[in-house]
Image: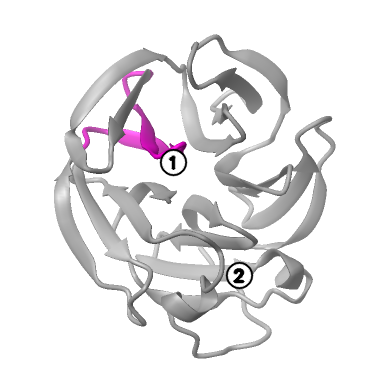
Amino acid sequence: MRKFILLSIASIGISTILNGQNCSKIIAANSSNDVYVADVNNSDLVWKKMGKANNVVGMTALNGEIFAVNSNNELYKTSPKNINAWRKIGDAEGVVALASYGAKLFAANNKNEIWYTSSNNINWIKLGNGEGIVGMCIVNGKIYAANRQNELWVSPISSINWTKIGYAGGVTSLSACGKIIIGTNTSNEMWAIDVNKIGNNEWVKQGTAYNVRGMAIF
């Protein structure tokens, strides 16, 4: 499976690429049920173990809290200050990717559907369809989704209508901070791209991130 495809390679650290984007931490859950955190103010990506999260298949941050869905179709949330204090808040069937925007959670499932719910009152509503999604995030009211064909697509939240805009190979998770999309892949790498540079496939490698299954930036 292809890695992220670059037409332009630049050496830009995580603190530089996220400068001015109003985020400070990246949290990642891996296939060993461990949760790690990295400080985006460091020029290099340095991971520190902070707790556990079992069988994560999707993760996102919203209003200072971390939300995660597991392979048992359960939706949990916790505070990044006490990552092990996970509390079940609802169900989320067949989720393969989780994202957030405004006060809502958005999920792609294994039936190629996109659903959303209020984060305060879990009641999933179907928004539309999305074929083969493996990771997604939301920037400025648009859903960016990577699929199993290593393609990157975008759609307005208001009305699902997908447009292919680039490539992102082997994605295991996507998240976003401001206008920057962060992705991890099956080669245990983390990459970043400005949404305004997706047309040129200007992904920039940030470092390693092993076996990531869900990621949140806050």
Q: Does residue 198 sit above or below 43 in this rendering? A: above
Residue shown at the point (16%, 50%) measured from the top left? 50
Dots 2, 1 in contact, CB < 8 A: no
Give residue 187's position: percent from left, percent from top: 38, 66
Q: Quadrant of residue 150?
A: bottom right
**In-image side of 49 versus 195 (left or right):** left
The rendered magenta stretch, by its main secondary structure, is classed as strand
Residue 119, image x, y percentages: 50, 22
- Please report the residue visible at 31 percent of the width from the left and 19 percent of the height from the top: 72
Q: Secondary structure at mark 2?
A: strand
Q: Of residues 71 and 37, which is closer to you in this image? A: 37
Residue drawn at (47%, 37%) of the image: 62
Density class for disc 2 (Cα within 10 Å; few <14, some 14-19, many ≥20) is: many
User: Circle 1 — which element?
Assistant: strand
Q: Nearer the viewer, residue 77 or 187?
A: 77
In the displayed structure, 199 sits above or below 43; it is: above
Q: Is residue 19 magenta?
A: no
Res. 3 visible in picture: no
What's the residue type where badge 2 is placed? Ile
- Residue 130 sits above or below residue 186 on the image: above
**In this picture, residue 127 sits left or right of residue 215:** right
Question: Magenta residues?
Answer: 53-73
Cα distance, mark 2 to mark 1?
19 Å
Q: Please give the residue where the numbered disc 2 appears in the rendered image.
A: 193
Residue beneath label 1, please? 61
**Does 57 appear in magenta?**
yes
